[in-house]
Image (cartoon, helix red, strand yellow):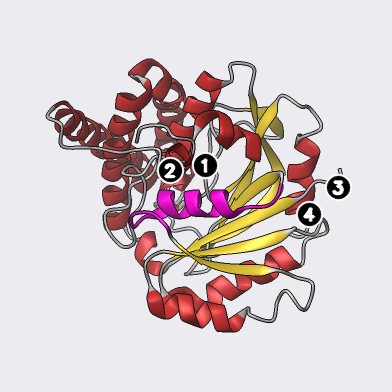
Amino acid sequence: MSDRAFSVVICVYTEDRWEDILAAVDSVRAQSLPALETLLVVDHNAALLERLGKEYKESAADGEEVRVLANAGPRGLSAGRNTGIAAARGEFVAFLDDDAVAERDWLRYFAEGYDDRQVMAVGGRTMAAWASGRRPVWFPEEFDWVVGCTYRGLPPGKVRVRNVLGGNASFRRSAFDASGGFATGIGRDGDKRPLGCEETELCIRLAKALPDAVLLIDDRAVIHHKVPAVRERFGYFRTRAYAEGLSKALVARSVGAARGLESERRYTTRVLPAGVVRGLRDVVLGRRGGAGRAGAIVTGVAAAAGGYVVGSVRARRGGATFSSGPLAASRGEPE
């Protein structure tokens, strides 16, 4: 395990997160299993690119290589990740959000997952670091994916999954050789509507390209993800749920509804009804927030369903396009 070389990719886009970016890099440098390199991919921000280049220009001399790169594709998280993948020198590529910090054994637990040669991806557990200091009383754990974190309904321990979560994940480099990169046109684009699901689409495509591939989540591989005050508000919750529906429509268009919505059906029919029941039970028992959590679950489902319908109509009309980006192009495949 100790000889497994990880390239860690952190995609960044704004100087407003300067201190967060430095903290993310420091958490990689402090890993018990040292990373081969950290790649900071800057998304079309010349000032941030220059500032980070100056900050880390001496890193190679210190034996802790941090490389600062410009996103070589269109604006957005997917193209930034593809740029990092293309530049990575490690056999394994890990991804960390720019507003998150990894615990010391994060990479070590990722590395253990690759003892089995069929394992193509290993994800971890993402814990919310709320700006207010604690979870809003109305915010249901079943919807922690809204703020980019591990949510109630995912199985605990080290388990096989359909897809890993992109802000806390790793892949064999060969996984991208087999399946291509992240699809542009699905995920986030700076401060625009908070879309997602690019890692879901990639993982489903990977499983199709390599039917024997195994994808895991090991909840010992922990990162702590900052949740700013604006994302603790109900308005963001509703907007993000709607955007998830839009994104799921694109995923279903890419890989088919059967594959693209398989896990979501179980989540919607089992996990969420149980969450509503818990909320209503808390109301009966006089516990704070029960009605709010039950109502938020119902609202979130309705918003996501509305987004899916709108996204599906747009896709059928040809209003939504996406491609697998520069990795496909580098192999001579059509985009």
The correct choice, above or below, for 178 with respect to 68 in the image is: above
From the image, tell me which residue sits under label 1.
151
Q: CA distance from mark 4 to mark 3?
A: 15 Å
* Region of the chain picked out in magenta, as a range: 72-90
Q: Residue at x 30, y 56 (%)?
A: 236
Q: CA distance from mark 3 to mark 1?
A: 33 Å
Q: Amino acid at mark 1?
A: Tyr
Viewport quadrant of the N terminus: top right
Q: CA distance from mark 2 to mark 1?
A: 6 Å
Q: Nearer the viewer, mark 4 or mark 2?
A: 4
Counting from the top left corner in percent of width and height, residue 265 is at: 40, 21
Q: Nearer the viewer, mark 3 or mark 2?
A: 3
Q: Amino acid at mark 3?
A: Asp
Asked if the residues shown at circle 2 and circle 1 are in contact, with their CB atoms under 8 angstroms apart, the answer is: yes
Viewport quadrant of the C terminus: top left
Q: Quadrant of residue 39?
A: bottom right
From the image, tell me which residue sits under label 3.
3
Q: Which mark is residue 143?
A: 2
First along the sequence among labels 1 and 4: 4
Q: Residue at x 40, y 43 (%)?
A: 325
From the image, tell me which residue sits under label 4.
105
Residue 215 visible within the image? yes
The correct choice, above or below, for 113 with respect to 131 in the image is: above
Could you tell whether 149 is left or right of 315 in the image?
A: right
Could you tell whether 290 is left or right of 310 in the image?
A: right
